[in-house]
Amino acid sequence: MRFSEETRVSDLGERGVVDLLMGLIGESGVNLLPHPDDAVAVKLNGRVLVFKTDMFAASTDMPPMMSFYDAGWKTVIMNISDLACKGAIPLYFIYSMGVPRDFKLVDVLETVRGIRDAAFKYGVKVLGGDLGECKELVISGFLAGSCPSGRLMPRRGAKSGDLLAVTGCFGLTAAALETFIRGLKVDEKQLQLFKNTLFKPEARVKEALALAECGAVTSIIDSSDGLLESLLELAKVNNVGFIVEELPVCDHVREFAEMFNFKLEDLVFRGGEEYELVITLKPEKLEDAVRAVEEAGGVLKVIGRVLDRPGIFYEGDNGRVELKGGGYEHFKNDI
């Protein structure tokens, strides 16, 4: 990748910069989830240890009405979601937190309470962390987990003919973000739903572990950057394309789109922060996968299939269209 001394990180975007950094570091030779996967894994004494780190920064990750408790909660969920979708059980969490010197002590405590409570929900032990001075609230999380050898689920592995499935509805977080940023007027029931969706997300840990055990998954990613971006990432690493034949949307999102004149496809494909699983499956294992997820308390919806040619396509009411662009990317998008 060519660049000059005047090149800014915004010229490349997060993924372009990460590609350059990985070129500097190089592959370790022991990582079972090589770049561009979003976690790392190594073998140790017959098991696989899986590690994940992710960061929350107030200026880019903290929308209006979000509390400091929610910020701590979300930092943990970001890490748990990425680690669990590798098929690993999340075990231990460490955080580093930077705050301004005039930051209120009560807000520091609320942030850590959010970290503690989110970790507790998923059986994760918080081992401690580090506190330092910063220009804004920044929380960096580090999560360790493990899985049996042979159950690791990487991004790489999808092939033409596989089914495309997801674990839930898309577009709620996009609707919530539009509501809070634009100050849209919604009823109290919608407002509470949007707050829970955006500020108290949940990771699909049980569903991911059930899928890892049934052996149906050929590739997987979580949708924290949006459904379209997730599909673009899977397509790139697997040299395939996708056709979405059924929009994974719920009635709440349809009603919101109609009420405020939003394009439904934009809310579904270009949102983010859903923390749903986006999966490709062996067709002959579909029933096993659906049963496994349902027994874990979740749902699995087939929304399309894998193509042998590049491109992300949606088969909607107006025929087949190719979807361009993606979801959120650091250094390129504003909150």
Image: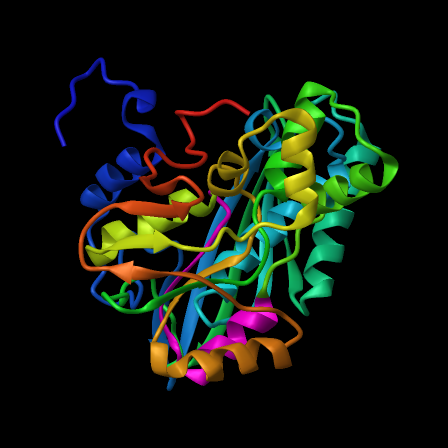
Q: Is residue 281 above or below residue 27?
A: below
Percent coordinates x, y for residue 331 in the rendering: 40, 26
Whether residue 208 appears in magenta in the rendering, the answer is: yes
Image x and y of residue 226, in percent: 47, 43
| Residue 196 vertical placement versus 161 (above, below) | above
Could you say which quadrant of the image residue 262 lies in?
Answer: top right
Whether residue 126 is situated above or below residue 171 in the rendered picture: below
State the image coordinates of residue 165 (x, y, percent, origin top left): 45, 63
Left or right placement of residue 314 versus residue 171 in this view: left
Q: Quadrant of the N terminus?
A: top left
| Residue visible at 51% across and 69% down in the picture | 145
Instruction: Give yes or no for residue 319 being in the magenta stretch.
Output: no
Q: Position of residue 33 (x, y in %)?
A: 31, 63
Outermost residue, top direction? Answer: 6
Between 201 and 177, the one nearer to me in the picture:
177
**Residue at 41% of width from left, 44% of height from top?**
228
Direction left: furthest residue: 2
Q: Nearer the viewer, residue 21 or 171?
A: 171
Can residue 129 be seen here? The reply is no
Q: Which stretch appears magenta?
A: 205-225
* Left or right side of 154 for 330: right
Q: Quadrant of the C terminus?
A: top right
